[in-house]
Image (tube, rainbow, N blue to C red):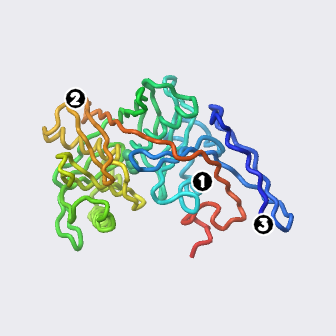
Amino acid sequence: MLRCTVPAFPESCRIPHRHRTLPAIRCRRADESMVAMQTLDVIDSHTAGEPTRVVVAGFPDLGGGDPAAQLRRFRQDFDRWRSATVCEPRGSDTVVGALLLPPTEPDAAAGVIFFNNVGYLGMCGHGTIGVVRTLHALGRLAPGAHRLQTPVGTVGVELHADGRVSVDNVESYRLAADVAVDVPGHGRVRGDIAWGGNWFFITAQTPLPLMLRHQRELTAYSEAIGNALRKSGITGADGAEIDHIELNAPADDGSGVIANFVLCPGLAYDRSPCGTGTSAKMACLAADGKLAEGETWIQQGILGTRFEGRYRRGTRGILPRITGEAFLTAKAQLCIDDSDPFAWGIGAAGDGAR
Ligand code: PYC
């Protein structure tokens, strides 16, 4: 038996702005030997059904610099902290982590690095909405307009009085239209390649209606498209991997809106309508002359939840604004006990899994 006293998460949730390394928790095993634990303070939320886990304290120092520089250090030297935070047994394939960083631009409220069960995301729309709600809960962000730094650029955010959050995403554009790829078992699939803060292949060809009860088949189909793109050498700009697959079809609820199914890099499907996916989709619609500047686009996700989008013209593509809502679900302290074979997450290098 392990007796462990975990300091209570501060009731007010007001964690100092600067990241701090909490003192290791010392736990006494039944045999009276002491083990040290490292801890991470996190706040969980979901945006339109898709979870976000914001790390607010306890993370190792990534050496400063902007989020792109800190991401390089994170990936190279601290990747096991990613899997410890979002993978089982503490998280799941669906959780997107968001590490808060002190801002390096004078007008930014914070920096953030997004990550998931297999790696890192350039930007994350639903995650940004979760981060804004979390910063508000921490007393670090008032309603109004702010800026957040991400590894792929600084984005605008606005916390509205009704609790909804708008994200002024990075410039989004269509790289290539009507690209054909041969997908084993499914024939030739055509779609657009677009950037919305992540790389997307967007197709209207779908083997089944976009309904939650078909998620396994839709996942397998989307995974097959992703594999075929990789095998065919079809990429985003500068050879970047297209790691998000987006299926589009009219929603089956008679509402007349377009629904999507988005498969994320770690093979979890996005429960939300996907903020970066909505941005990429709007870039394609704008390029086709099917969505005018300032016009509202409703993007429905696989759970029936919605984001509202519109755009202004950019230099290369569009400047999208995505609006949605997040809800806090937990304030917690994660414990990492080095003697635990799964301390750094199932699937992490060196875990006890076979
Ligand atoms: O909302 O941009 C998004 C997103 C990307 C992956 C999961 N959610």
Q: Secondary structure at mark 2?
A: loop
Does 323 sit above or below residue 73? above
**102 sits left or right of 296 in the view:** right
14 or 145: which is nearer to us? 14
Q: Secondary structure at mark 3?
A: loop
What residue is rendered at 49% in x and 45% in y?
Answer: 45
Mark identifier at residue 81? 1
Q: Which residue is mark 2?
A: 294
Residue type for callout 1: Trp
Residue type for callout 2: Gly
Indicate which disc, 1 or 3, sits on the residue closer to the N terminus: 3
Q: Nearer the viewer, mark 3 or mark 2?
A: 3
Residue 253, given in percent of the width and then of the height, sits at 21, 52
Q: Which residue is mark 3?
A: 1
Question: Does residue 281 appear in the picture of this structure?
Answer: yes
Indicate which disc, 3 or 2, sits on the residue closer to the N terminus: 3
Asked which quadrant contains residue 269, the reply is bottom left
